[in-house]
Amino acid sequence: MLPVDAKTHLTPAHMPVWTLAICAAALLVFFMPGLGALLVYDRAAIAQGELWRLVTGNLVHLSVTHLAYDLAAFLIAGTIIEMRGYRHFALLCTSAAMLIGIAIQGLKPELNFYGGLSGVVTAAITYLCLQGLTEKGTWRWLCAAMLAGLAAKSWVELVPGKSLLAAVSTEAFVPVPLSHLTGAASAILLFVLMRLSASMGQAKTAMHP
Amino acid sequence: MKTTGISLFTALAISLLVVALFGGCATGATKNATSVVDYLFPDTKDPVVTPGIPVLTLPVRVGIAFVPSGSPGRSSRYGAGGFGSFQGGNLALTEKKKNDLMQAVADRFKKYPFVKDIEIIPSAYLKPGGSFANLDQIRTMYGVDVIALLSYDQVQFTDEGTLSLTYWTIVGAYVIPAEKNDTQTMLDAVVYDIPSRKMLFRAPGLSHIRGSATLVNQSEQLRADSGKGFDDASKELIVNLDEQLAHFREKVKERPEEFRVVNSPGYSGGGSGGGSIDPVSLLLLSGLGGCFLWMRKRI
């Protein structure tokens, strides 16, 4: 059922190694609170030079429900990406995590602590859907529908200032839609760069066959 | 003369036997403790302070401190009989260990979004028997509303077993582990709301260590047992503290008549933020995942 021309964007399908590794890391951090304290996004500690927290904060979760939702979503999105062989997934996760940390540092000065993988999950879903749009058949339409749903959800989160999570959750922490937006932006950026790079490569080949 | 010689020899033998037997029954104990009650309610016959209803202004600033020792009679040792003098009293709760424990406690608090800052208060700022007046000073100095007071109570018992008779050979004192040690430790974290004088919750950590040592290395072994006792009790305290913090959060929600919660201006439950996927997105994604699996089957 895989569209023929999609194979140009694929590498051989394999085990979702990165997905499992990141999930394992998040679980480890959650069940070792000392490690969580060392890795959580902590504005004061970052100001004192602990810059790794900008990235590693994404691995820290603040409750079991928080962890369960994020891991379930990441497991699904990451597994599809890796099994379909979409490239640069590790690069996507790393760059999204970094950009999310930087965005919170710069644009959310009232936030002292931050934790959660959802920004990276949003990056993964966006990337998955964008890659899906380049394919043909049912998968393309499914990805388009998912992307539209994601955009609608982001709009609900941003415009009325009300998170869907906040509406149903009893969590004490504040949802941070900025992390989702930054994640989506990182995915779009990586996707565009990949397309540009591929186009330039094709142009070079055409000029010098 | 002959009769007198026999009597002296007999008397000497009996004396040695008595000393040896009593030596074998020697015992001793050392107690090192600090007490939250002694600190908060010193020299008070009726240690009752009527607490008010705590008003928790979120996000709260939390202080962590060890209750000072120094109250007379809180550290004591006693012993009876025995070969060597009692070697107890090797309290292994060094400043580094205290600091590590306070840091671990701080890490537990840090996880919660209703905690804004955590201040580790140096022991020097707490006066023995300082009571709430001292806590008020700390509140002013550090701007903390809630304080976690840590205290400890460690008792070490030593007994000489029957094998201590071998000490008479001198070599026995070096090679036979006839000293039986028993170390019981309790660490306690009590969390108070300073303005209302109300205890919010407490979490204990306990440890019990049994060991043995030769007469010569008894002091070293007691010190090691003391250190291990504090390490084990710290671990248990941290686990209990996690539970109590979670329980307290629920209690505040369930019993608004006991705890009033006020949000600081500009505080909307945050200070801490979480990036979390909502159920709708997860549902959509699950649908996509299902389709992916279905399509793979059809390939």
Image (cartoon, helix red, strand yellow):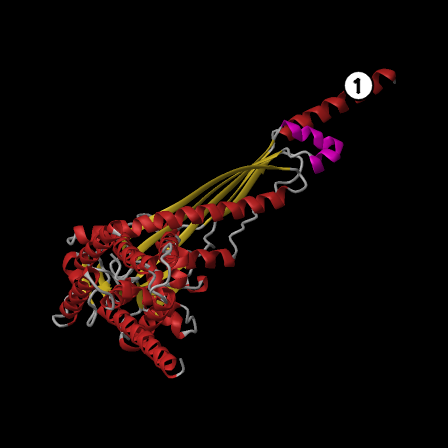
Q: Is residue B17 above or below residue B265?
A: above
Residue B91 coordinates in the image, percent (x, y) = 54, 49
Q: Is residue B175 above or below residue B191?
A: above
Q: Is residue A95 left or right of residue B94?
A: left
Q: Residue furthest right?
A: B1
- Judging depth in this view, the residue of B235 and A55 nearest the camera is A55
The residue where tag 1 is placed is B7
Amino acid under disc 1? Ser
Q: Main secondary structure of the magenta part?
A: helix
Q: Is residue B243 above or below residue A40?
A: above
Quarter placement of the N terminus of chain A: bottom left
| Any part of residue B60 in sight | no
| Any part of residue B37 in sight | yes
In terms of secondary structure, where does tag 1 sit?
Answer: helix
Q: Residue at x 77, y 19 (%)?
A: B10
Query: Mark 1, residues whose alpha carbon is within 10 Å: few (<14), some, or many (≥20)?
Result: few
- Judging depth in this view, the residue of B216 and A189 nearest the camera is A189
- Judging depth in this view, the residue of B154 and B265 nearest the camera is B265
- The subunit carrying tag 1 is B
Residue A75 coordinates in the image, percent (x, y) = 30, 55
Residue B220 coordinates in the image, percent (x, y) = 62, 46
Q: Image quadrant of residue B20?
A: top right
Q: Is residue A178 left or right of residue A92?
A: left
Residue B144 coordinates in the image, percent (x, y) = 31, 65
Q: Residue furthest bottom?
A: A207
Magenta part of the chain: B162-175
Quarter placement of the C terminus of chain A: bottom left
- Judging depth in this view, the residue of A38 and B187 nearest the camera is A38
